[in-house]
């Protein structure tokens, strides 16, 4: 085996981890793969002879590439996705949806609200155990400043509205709603709904140009299955303005949210939020397990 072959084999061993770092940094599978490929090109040019810790070196390179992409993206902040874009937004929707589900759709949404330095500090330290000394070097800041960035990001991820005693039951209700919606199981869906449940959807949420109101478990259950938002591969549980709910977020970009009112273990109200100006104002955090 030549030195180049050995280097290529070692890189392939690192590829899944590097892809995981890049995907959490960027929220886009195609951009993550581009960042990993850039790391390989740099390694190929440099050679590995003077690299003491290849895994750390590659992580640093991928993180720098991602940081530059995030800063560029931040300078030309994109608007929320249009409905027509949702199905066309990724080259391989199935694979990206699987990755998003493994990471957590809500986490990707929250990460998308962080500034590039906060996102890098949180992802590298909290998700990949990179020391703050290395993160500080990447960001040209002190380890203490890097620690502060990660702490600030962590508070955003967890949210300030969570009531720990309720989180387990909240998550159960949301998971059951998602499972029943995805299976098209009308009976299971109705069993989760209060008989007098009310669903309110803004004018951007459906085919009608007017806001929609549905009342009663049967009507809301049929409407939820017909709408199909919760069946999307890019839908996942979240806290929406402090309430349990579901977010739909292709490429980690928030497109639509459902906020639930839960009473006595049943969903008593659903608010569907899709108008871009309202979506921008939402506070999204991770709904704990």
Image: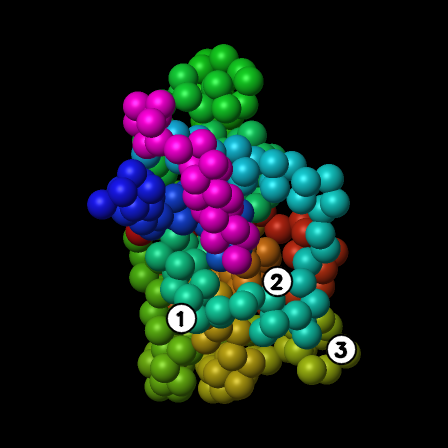
Outermost residue to the front: 2
Label number found at residue 210: 3
Residue 273 shows up from this direction = no
The residue indicated by pointer 2 is 255
C-alpha distance separating marks 1 and 3:
26 Å
**Quadrant (top left, top right, bottom left, bottom right) of the N terminus:** top left
Circle 1 is placed at which residue position?
Answer: 178
**In what element is the residue under mark 3?**
loop
Q: Are marks 1 and 3 in contact (CB under 8 Å)?
A: no
Q: Is residue 71 left or right of residue 251?
A: right
Magenta-colored segment: predominant secondary structure: helix
- Looking at this view, name the residue that lies furthest to the left: 1
Earlier along the polypeptide chain: callout 2 or callout 3?
Answer: 3
Q: Residue 252, image x and y in percent?
A: 54, 55
Which one is in front, 212 or 23?
23
| Residue 49 lies in the magenta stretch | yes
């Amino acid at each position: 085996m030549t030195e180049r072959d050995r280097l290529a084999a070692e890189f392939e061993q690192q590829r899944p981890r590097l892809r995981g770092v890049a995907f959490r940094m960027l929220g886009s599978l195609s951009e993550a793969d581009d960042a990993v490929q850039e790391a390989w090109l740099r390694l190929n040019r440099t050679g590995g002879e003077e690299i003491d810790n290849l895994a750390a070196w590659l992580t640093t390179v991928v993180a720098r590439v991602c940081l530059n992409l995030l800063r560029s993206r931040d300078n030309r902040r994109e608007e929320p996705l249009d409905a027509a874009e949702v199905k066309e937004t990724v080259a391989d929707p199935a694979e990206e949806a699987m990755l998003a589900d493994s990471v957590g759709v809500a986490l990707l949404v929250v990460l998308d609200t962080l500034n590039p330095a906060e996102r890098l500090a949180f992802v590298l330290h909290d998700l990949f155990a990179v020391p703050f000394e290395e993160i500080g070097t990447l960001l040209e800041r002190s380890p203490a400043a890097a620690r502060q960035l990660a702490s600030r990001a962590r508070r955003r991820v967890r949210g300030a509205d969570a009531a720990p005693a309720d989180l387990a039951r909240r998550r159960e209700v949301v998971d059951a709603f998602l499972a029943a919606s995805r299976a098209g199981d009308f009976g299971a869906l109705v069993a989760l709904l209060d008989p007098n449940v009310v669903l309110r959807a803004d004018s951007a949420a459906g085919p009608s140009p007017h806001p929609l109101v549905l009342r009663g478990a049967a009507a809301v259950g049929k409407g939820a299955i017909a709408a199909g938002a919760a069946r999307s591969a890019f839908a996942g549980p979240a806290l929406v303005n402090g309430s349990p709910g579901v977010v739909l977020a292709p490429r980690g970009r928030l497109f639509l949210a459902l906020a639930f009112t839960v009473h006595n273990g049943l969903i008593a109200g659903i608010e569907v939020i899709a108008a871009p100006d309202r979506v921008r104002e939402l506070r999204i955090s991770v709904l704990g397990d």
